[in-house]
Image (cartoon, grey):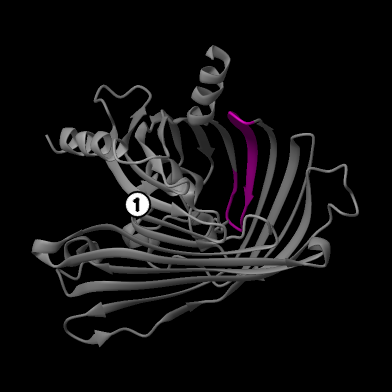
Amino acid sequence: MRWICFFLFLCLLSGHLEAYEWKYSLGFDFYLDNLEDSDPYWATRTIYGVRLAPEIGIAFDNHQSLMIGGYAIQNMGEQKFPTKANASIYYSAIGEKFRGYFGIFRRTHSIAHYPLSFFRNDFYFFNPNINGLLFQYKPQNNVNGYAEFIFDWYGGNLSKRLDEFMVLASSEFKFLQEYLYIGGNFLMYHFKNDEYLAKDGSNGDTYLLDRIYYNLYVGSSLKTLMPFMDKAYVQFGTISSLERKRRLSTGLDPFYNGLGWEFDAGIQYKGFGIKNSYYFGKPQMKYFSQYGEDFYNGLPFYQATNYDRADFYYEYKNDILTARISFIFHFTPKTVASQQMLTISLDTHKLFKKIKQNIE
């Protein structure tokens, strides 16, 4: 009944606006991920699923939108349908320099590039929505920099006083024809859930876990030197974290300071690319053995003091379709793991617009 009322509200709103446009999309994503020989850092697994994320709404006054929709994820082979589903409903305002999103909206509206120590690929697939707000600074006529802030209340239970949210911030600016760029990413988790944290055997004594991740980097794009390349860059920065538990009996634990560094380099030519990342420093994800991959959203290989990731891929992209196949190798002191990944995404909003134009 609530969805019907909201739809009627949209229809009523459209009748009082001089300039408006109906917006709609289906949002199709395919994800195949096979991981082997990843013990002891991570259990081997195969993920094979599809996601539909339909949306419908109205754009008005040239830069504002009100949208409603949701997503449904289906793992291949499972009898239950859907495997996971949720709703989306949000308002957005997009100006020449600033953008804002409010409500429950797709994570793809984010323009930042967060490191894999923050979020791995399957996290984005199974957690496609942000619950809260997003602010962005990105001038339309200036591609040399951006800034972003996200507040995501992703879980919790108000009646039980359980609070689970994350705060994200990101910024990057380019200089000297992109020969130099600097940037940073910040992530803070506030996780107050004594029921979940009791997995450490504390029987409710551990009631809150603070986690702070930060990534500051400097890099250089070499495309000006090699204009025939799709991508060419080198980058160096810190991949670090702070973690501590809060206990009812003893108060605050001291912060675990997981200071580390990472060197990245990548090239891509006509869709074929190689990307290599080398991490060295203290182990990340201090409590992974207690809470596992459902709690930590980054790559578990960052638990190693030395970790090299080599990604060989081919990416095809046009206005409607983005497809990528990757062969990834993870080198750590304890194992050499391999991973094969295939992702396909369709921008169905642009697809429907082209179909409409051809009909007209």
User: What kind of secondary structure does the magenta stretch mostly adopt?
Assistant: strand
Q: Which residue is mark 1?
A: 294
* Identity of the residue drawn at 56% across and 76% down: 259
Residue 193 visible in the snapshot: no
Q: Quadrant of residue 167?
A: bottom left
Q: Quadrant of residue 280?
A: bottom right
**Residue 327 falls within the magenta-colored stretch:** yes
- Judged from this view, the residue extending furthest toward the top is 359
Q: Position of residue 351 (x, y in %)?
A: 53, 24
Where does the image place residue 332, in percent across and percent down from the top left? 61, 56
Q: Is residue 317 visible?
A: yes
Q: Is residue 193 above or below residue 222?
A: below
Q: Quadrant of the N terminus?
A: top left
Q: Is residue 337 above or below residue 51?
A: below
Measured as percent of width and height from the top left, residue 219 is found at 74, 65
- Name the kind of residue labelled 1 in the image: Asp
Task: Residue at 8% x, 62% y: name it.
Answer: 159
Which quadrant would the C terminus be assigned to in this image? top right
For this view, does 310 lie left or right of residue 225?
left
- Write the start and end of the magenta stretch as one range: 319-337
In the visual, does 2 lie left or right of 123? left
Instruction: State the residue in front, 174 or 296.
Output: 174
Label 1 sits on a secondary structure element that is: loop
Q: Is residue 279 left or right of residue 70?
A: right
Number of numbered labels in the structure image: 1
Q: Locate residue 243, reporting x and y percent.
A: 40, 75
Q: Which of the two residues, 41 or 62, is positioned nearer the viewer here?
A: 62
Residue 208 within the segment the image draws in magenta = no
